[in-house]
Image: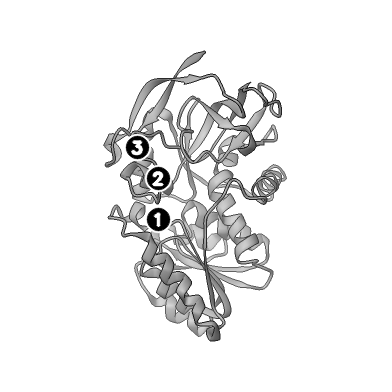
Amino acid sequence: METTIRKVLVPHFGDESVLQIIEATVASPQVGEVQVQVLHSVVAGSDVNMRRGLYPFQKKAPLTPGYSMIGRALANGPGCKKFAPGTLVACLTIYGSQAERMNVPEKFVSPVPEGLDLRQATALILDWMTAYEMLEHSAHVKRGQRIFVHGLSGAVGTALLHLAHLRGAEVFGTASVSKHAELSAADAVVFDYRQKDWIQQMQRLGGVDSVFDPLGYQSFDESYSILRKGGLLVGYGQNLPALSNGPRPSPLPMILKLFARNLAFWSGKRTTFFGLFRGSKHFAPDLACLFRMLGEGRIRVPIKAVFPLADVQEAHRTYARGSGVGSIILDVA
């Protein structure tokens, strides 16, 4: 049995104008699948890069974007019984969640506690999970440490700021001047991203324990230079093309150069590259932890803008403008 739905379509790669809202059908869930009515999705750098055809190892167009979602289970495919119809659920979908309904593998679906702010909870699945797992499993950030974050006003940057403070770390980073007052009020020491004076100032302080760099390419050299002995550079995202609307060079030489730094073992500095993996043994318990923190009021997720499904083009334009602080949410249902 098929159901008619609306969804976002990228028919071919290009600017925001290529995004379409179309009618399509979704089939009944197959073995191992749960059909979900999607309530909210995010618009992130990954979606922007997929629309432009620049996301590493992505599908060819046509495709429906949507890297994460929260919704309600509607029906179970054969062999599935974990989520009763009506259950509030979350999933890191990678593709497809900018649609009114979708079928997702049950093994990647997580329960969502009732009573949460669902827009904030949606932002946790991709943006805050990326920040949480980098702090917890990559850098092992602890009380008294000093970290540096490129793009503090972005969705992941904001999450790193708040979660690192909860761990007792001191947070430095870059952002546009228009965001400095808000970030300073959140106890960040912030520098103008267009200037390079942060390099000398951080070196003067004796360096940092961790740098979180979503830009890549030439910025990895600068980030590496402010690490103290024993410090760690965490590369992730490769979002510079989405932010600058420029071309994406091949990521392979950049990643190889990043890891080549580890050969200089005598420096005491280390590098790694982080990618969020929904099949990780950490994913479900870490997401449950973030949901608890949101429910207990220990975190508040900044939402910079909310758009209905029909305004997905404007959501992408808002991402490109870089205005505001936090995540962009798409109301789907």
Residue 39 is left or right of residue 238, and the answer is right
Mark 2: few/some/many CA within 10 Å (<14, 14-19, 20+): some
From the viewer's perspective, tell me whether residue 286 is left or right of residue 251: right
User: Residue 190: where, in percent of width, then height?
Assistant: 48, 67
Which amino acid type is marked by label 3? Glu
Q: Is residue 139 shown above or below 319?
A: below
Residue matched to label 2: 58
Q: Identify the element where label 1 is drawn.
A: loop
Query: Residue 239, labelled with which disc?
Result: 1
**In front of the other: 22 or 62:** 62
Residue 286 screen position, x and y as percent:
67, 50
How far separated are the C-alphas under marks 2 and 3? 23 Å
Residue shown at the point (67%, 73%) measured from the top left: 144
* Relative vertical location of residue 60 with respect to residue 132 in this rendering, above or below: above
Vertical position of residue 207 compared to residue 28: above or below: below
Task: Identify which residue is drawn at 39% across, 62% down.
Answer: 252
Whether tag 2 and tag 1 are in contact, CB under 8 A, the answer is no
Between 191 and 275, the residue placed more toward the observer is: 275
The residue located at (70%, 25%) in the rendering is 81
Q: CA distance from mark 2 to mark 1?
A: 15 Å
Q: Residues within 10 Å of mark 3 (few under 14, many from 20)?
A: some
Residue position marked by numbered label 3 in the rendering? 314
Rendering coords of residue 101 (x, y %): 51, 24
The amino acid type found where label 1 is placed reads: Asn
167, above or below 279, in the image: below
The total of numbered circles placed on residues is 3
